Image (cartoon, grey):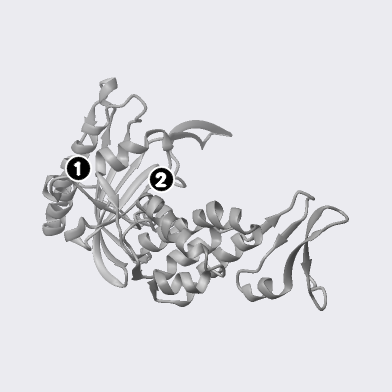
Amino acid sequence: MINLYNTNIDTLSIHRVGNKSRNEAIFLSEQPFGMNDEVAPLIKEFFFKPFRDKEENYYQFAHEIDLEYNDMYKFATEMFENPSNAHDISKKITKHLFEQSNHPHIKNGEVYVTYLTNLTIDNNPVDAIGIFKSELQADFLQFEEKGTTLEMILQHGINLNKLDKGCIIFNYKKEEGYKILTVDSNRYDARYWLEHFLSVDAFEDENFITKKYLKFCQNFAKDVVLPAEDKKEEVMFMNRSVNYFAKNDQFEETNFLNEVLDNPDLIPEFKNYKVDKGEKYSIEDITSFPIANAAVSDARKSIKNVINLDTHIQIKLDFINPESAEKYVEKGWDEEKQMYYYLVYFNKEQKS
């Protein structure tokens, strides 16, 4: 978990990068930007709002040979070790970004490199480096009084409600390649920012593993439980899975399978499915790990708990009280109508 609410922007350097394939130039400011009290809160909201609103999927700098060969890892380490030299290092970062800006789809724009203090990540106070880019500009109107007439002036600039690209590099877990959060609002050049500029991989911490394991369980439910059982059991398997993660701090695969799979015949099916699909989710060799509560909460929101019937009727099962569906919902077959049915027991209807 991160906290950006009390973050200070100690230095802000603003540069501009063009597209090399279109022979557009790079512009490097000689001095850092001097923020005033009027601009500071607007800029902070522009930079940080996308990170407060998004799911925390962390990355880390990576290189197939050694981290020291990753340019951005070297620049980040240099800045963390010598924050007073942040502006000069920001020029190196911007030049590196310019060198990656050679695909026709990449847009020119302003680059903001900041040194940040007073952040927390995983309850640890740390410094960080923020790198942000604005690309898409919009028309806006200004008005000016001229005598007895109000003149309308059309101007062009960036929208402070939308950051195009950005990353925050936390001075945390240096040996693994630092913990990094990144956003990219424009999907037409996805590889440019993550792969070519930052050169990052997913940070495989407990948050990453918890999410991946729950995603794996979702696909097992769809591919194996649903064909072997029915839609209700698919939903209930995921219900029990999420509840197991929610009530435990440590995941143990044997305990998990015994608790969430009502049908013992599905346990070997689960293990075989993991052999076939585990590598795709980076969980092939994982049988025990600490559970990240935030990842469980995110997963619960995305898991469907509705049975859709071809008679245009929906049955919504309660994930908070799963025992109700186990005790009070039965599935059967009506010989006369030649149709399946769900039998639902209740005492009285609840007022909505």
Give the side of residue 80 with respect to residue 124, left or right.
Answer: left
Q: Residue at x 21, y 63 (%)?
A: 173
The answer to which image quadrant residue 69 occupies is top left
Q: Which residue is mark 1?
A: 93
Give the side of residue 143 with respect to residue 38, left or right.
Answer: right
What number is the disc on residue 135? none
Badge 1 vs badge 2, beta-carbon distance below 8 Å: no
Whole-angstrom CA distance, mark 1 to mark 2, is: 19 Å
> Residue 63's spot in the image, x, y percent?
18, 46
Q: What type is the residue that disc 2 sits on?
A: Leu
> Residue 27's spot in the image, x, y percent?
22, 33
Q: Is residue 153 above or below residue 113?
A: above
Local secondary structure at mark 2: loop
Q: Which residue is mark 2?
A: 163
> Residue 244's spot in the image, x, y percent?
49, 73
Q: Is residue 219 above or below residue 164?
A: below
Which of 337/93 is in front? 337
Local secondary structure at mark 1: helix
**In the rendered image, is residue 167 in sight?**
yes
The answer to which image quadrant residue 150 occupies is top right
Q: What type is the residue that disc 1 sits on?
A: Ile
